[in-house]
Image (tube, rainbow, N blue to C red):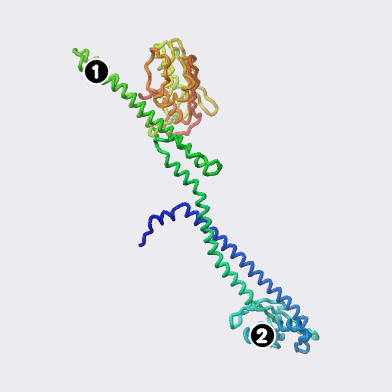
Amino acid sequence: MKVRPKSARRLTRGLRFRLTAGYALFFALVLIGVAALFRSRLESSLDEQMREVLLQEWAAMKGYLQIRDRQPRWFFDRDDPDESFIVERLRRVYMLADAKGNPIQWSTVYHDDLTLDSPEHIRAAIAAAEPSWRIRTDRHGEPYLIRAGVVYDEAHRRPYYVAIGRSLAPSRAIMREYTWIYAGVIPLGILCGCVLGWFLAGNALKPVKEVARAAQRISGSNLGLRIPVRGAGDELDYLIETFNRMIERLEKSFQQIRQFSTDVSHELRTPITAIRGQLEVAMFTARTTEQYRDGIFNALEDVERLSQIVRALLLLSQAESGQLALQKVPLDLAAVLRDLVEQFEIPADGAGVRISADLPEECVVEADRVQIERMVSNLLSNALKFTPQGGTVRVALERLPDSVEIAVEDTGRGIPTEHLPHIFDRFYRVPETHPQPGPEKGLGLGLSFVAWIARAHGGRVEVASEPGRGSRFVVVLPALATPTDQNRQPAGHPAPG
């Protein structure tokens, strides 16, 4: 088997080749269709023209031919060349027979080349008394159009059969000439279509190649590069804009990945450094068992902090990659929030913060209890952490026609406006202009969990905050969700971890 070279295969698979082939096929179909249509019209026109000529000659024949006493006579001026020519043309393909089918008069062409009509055919034509048309072919293969009918003698009104004809050879010659002309024009038209198609396809694909060359220059190190828009407002500009938006999203993703790597390295380095320091101090300075015990205890605290970071990162990674599936069941949000508020009353009292709840008797939605509790717990923890002594934290639940709103509001330090768009990013912590002793800084992952849990339930998180006056987080969840076949969890079921 002969294998085509790679260059030939690449050419035939190319878009330009396929577009050119499409142009050529289109031209071929158009030319063939037009040729067939015109040929049909030409053939029909020639046929109608020939029939019209025979009708005129039939009328002229009835004026020149008279039958008296069963003898046909042609009355015309033999000295007039025009009349002589007309009569001779009428009698070139001509036959006359009586009602019994007996030939009376005929032309040489009709007798020798076409053969005379049979008596049966003649009697049938006279009995029908209607003109008839048919095409007959002589012994040389030349076609003739024959027009036959009935005429009557002047004295006794006896019927006679008359047939006159015209050769179709000139019409067939015109049709053959037309066919040969178009047989040469169609390949030429297809060739012109290929050349034109190749040129048009090249011009149409030229901007695409420019876009491809520009796209090749974009890499991970220069994701800020954008493909310039041509300004034509066509599909290619739409493709370029879409590609630029994709590159913009990739750039943001790369920035997030780099920032995430930096943050993870920083968060892991801090407890690891602390663990190493505690162990080194215990190794080189401890003298008693109690000193060793204190060093190991401090190191274990940092190990626990490190474990919390790793677990939180693993859980968030599983959540955002879709590996953490929700277990949605009919859940009474009012009962869940009521239990959580009760659990946070002790730490709130210890911090000197008053916590309250404004909850309806019942509010059932389809949700994952564990994730809902994690989400609300993170919001309450942040509210208590950043609310000073004497402040208040309020939890509210409101059911709207098509949604349910969970609001956690505090009177804490608030969040500056420029930081609000970033507070749901991983490891993002609002920087403090004047650091003050207070609660330990978190990992910066709690609000990332809140945002993911809300999105996973088909909802969203809204935040409003003002420095010095507190913050308000509102989680909007769908009021109706897809029913599940799982059993409803009891409202008092505790969340793991």
Which quadrant: the C terminus?
Answer: top left
Q: Secondary structure at mark 1?
A: helix
Q: Residues within 10 Å of mark 2 (few under 14, many from 20)?
A: some
Which numbered tag is attached to residue 296? 1
Image quarter of residue 217: top left
Vertical comparison of 467 with 29: above or below: above
Q: Nearer the viewer, residue 151 or 195?
A: 195
Q: Residues within 10 Å of mark 1 (few under 14, many from 20)?
A: some
Instruction: Tell me residue 10's x, y (percent).
Output: 41, 54
Residue at horizontal 43 percent and vertical 16 percent from the top: 433
Residue 278 can be seen, yes or no:
yes
Vertical comparison of 142 with 404: above or below: below
Q: Nearer the viewer, residue 190 or 203?
A: 203
| Structural distance between the alpha carbons of marks 2 and 1 | 133 Å
Q: Amino acid at mark 1?
A: Ile
Q: Which residue is mark 2?
A: 119
Between disc 2 and disc 1, the foreground one is: 1
Instruction: Tell me residue 408's x, y (percent).
Output: 47, 20
Vertical comparison of 99 with 398: above or below: below
Q: Amino acid at mark 2?
A: Pro
Instruction: Tell me residue 347's x, y (percent).
Output: 39, 14
